[in-house]
Amino acid sequence: MSIKKTVIVTLTTDFGLQDPYVGQLKGALLLGYHNILPIDLSHAIAPWDLEAAAHCLYDSYRYFPKGSIHLVVVDPGVGSARKLIAAAGNGYYFVAPDNGVLSLLLASRQLDKACCISPDKIALSAISSTFHGRDILAPAAARLAQGAKLEELGPSLSLQELVRLPTHFIEPIDQLVTRLKGHVVLIDHFGNVRTNFHLARSGIDPARLLAIHVGGLDVNLYFPSYSAAAPGELFFLIDSAGYVEIAMNKGNAAQRIGCAKGDALTLMLSSTQTPIRPGMG
């Protein structure tokens, strides 16, 4: 008797936890394949916030074993003519609406192929026009967990056809640039303010970081960790995903600055490589 392999399926939604939607999504997965291990990535994405979902997925997918399936149900266009897609790349699978939630994966060339999910290719019961996550996407993810190939779920799609959000990645820069315009991409539960300046992707040398101008303030203190700063001190650091982040030790940086997601900011860089030091300003 063969032993069925357990497959991880992560869940990223804007459902919250007060309603039964997350539970129904997990139930639909397990109806399709009992040997699924559902992992909650986040259900606290703000309603309809596609950019936040894209960042959550991009920053997290690689921390799971190869072969994992990442299911995203942030779907303000549910019931419309937007496509539902499955994609594969770098050893992972992704199942989501075609509304831009895979944008960062596409921009960083992490996807190899995609298909448009055809409901008639999946064994389904009745399909609600308001919950395609449960009735189409979850069964599609379960089929992949069973070992189905993308082409068994529906016709192939060119990656160029997929919907892209403005990715807000700062592209590689040269040594002559000393000011970069950007914006706030998210504010987390602690009030930490993530910018769209990603060091590895942009090629920014951390030794050139001087300050961040946001909300009328210049944040010009750098520390390597939250605890290195004094309580209540506003500073910047490099966060766990490689982005420049404004933070406050044991305090809410976003409230202190008075900033919100989408607000403009400026990153100021030195024209020379002067190593940053804790408390430098």
Image (cartoon, grey):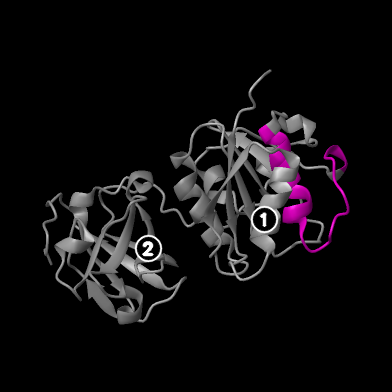
Task: Look at 34% across and 44% down and name the residue there.
Answer: 200
Task: Look at 11% across and 57% down and name the residue there.
Answer: 277
Q: Nearer the viewer, residue 242 or 144?
A: 144
**Pointer 2 local density, CA inside 10 Å: few below 14, some 14–19, many at least 20:** many
Q: Is residue 150 left or right of residue 80?
A: left
The correct choice, above or below, for 168 with respect to 253 in the image is above
Does the stretch in magenta take in 15? no
The magenta segment is: 120-145
The part of the image, by quadrant, that contains residue 189 is bottom left
Q: What numbered label is drawn on residue 99?
A: 1
Q: Residue tagged by mark 2?
A: 194
**What amino acid does circle 1 point to?**
Asn
Quadrant occupied by the N terminus: top right
Give the residue at the far top of this rendering. 1
**Residue 98 seen by the camera:** no
Task: Measure the C-alpha gap from mark 2 to mark 1.
Answer: 23 Å
The correct choice, above or below, for 253 with respect to 148 in the image is below
- Secondary structure of the residue carrying tag 1 is loop
**Pointer 1 local density, CA inside 10 Å: few below 14, some 14–19, many at least 20:** many
Task: Look at 84% across and 60% down and name the residue there.
Answer: 128
Quadrant occupied by the C terminus: bottom left
Q: Is residue 240 left or right of residue 274?
A: right
Give the residue at the far front of this rendering. 1
Q: Position of residue 7 (x, y in %)?
A: 59, 35
Q: Position of residue 270 (x, y in %)?
A: 19, 57
